[in-house]
Image: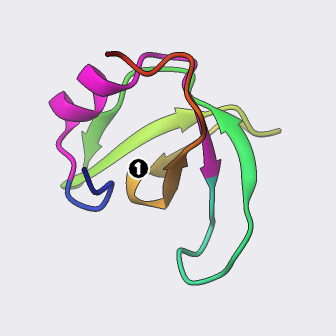
Amino acid sequence: MHMDTISVDDFNECFSVGSSFIWQRSRFLRGGLAINTLAPAYKLDGVVVVKINTEQQQVVPVAHLTPLGNRHQRQ
């Protein structure tokens, strides 16, 4: 499953709130910040986004997230 093409329903079905990811501000750079989701994903201006736990809780496109050994990932 590619995060660039995942739908809101598929994301929310696969990953519960609190799931862990690496967030990359730019998908073209290496590295990133380990984060957790704070709410279910939703669509904003046609883009699937989710709220994450950074210093200033922000909403980011799920395409910029890489799953990180999720204990919250639904089976």
Is 5 or 50 nearer to us in this picture? 5
Residue range of the region highlighted in magenta in the rendering:
6-22
Q: Is residue 18 magenta?
A: yes
Name which residue lies at 59% across and 75% down.
26
Residue farthest along the right direction in this orientation: 55
Q: Secondary structure at mark 1?
A: helix
Name which residue lies at 38% across and 22% down.
40
Q: Amino acid at mark 1?
A: Val
Q: Is residue 51 left or right of residue 57?
A: left
The correct choice, above or below, for 74 with respect to 66 in the image is above
Name which residue lies at 21% across and 48% down.
6
The correct choice, above or below, for 5 with respect to 40 in the image is below
Q: Position of residue 24 (x, y in %)?
A: 62, 63
Is 20 or 55 nearer to us in this picture? 20
Q: Is residue 52 magenta?
A: no
User: Where, quadrant-wise, is the C terminus in this rendering?
Assistant: top left
The crowding category of the residue bearing disc 1, from other C-alpha atoms within 10 Å (few below 14, some 14 to 19, many at least 20), is: many
Q: Is residue 16 left or right of residue 30?
A: left
The residue indicated by pointer 1 is: 62
Name which residue lies at 49% across and 60% down.
64
Q: What is the quadrant of residue 2 in the picture? A: bottom left
Colour scheme in use? rainbow
Q: Is residue 37 left or right of residue 22?
A: left
Q: Position of residue 60 (x, y in %)?
A: 50, 50
The correct choice, above or below, for 43 with respect to 4 in the image is above
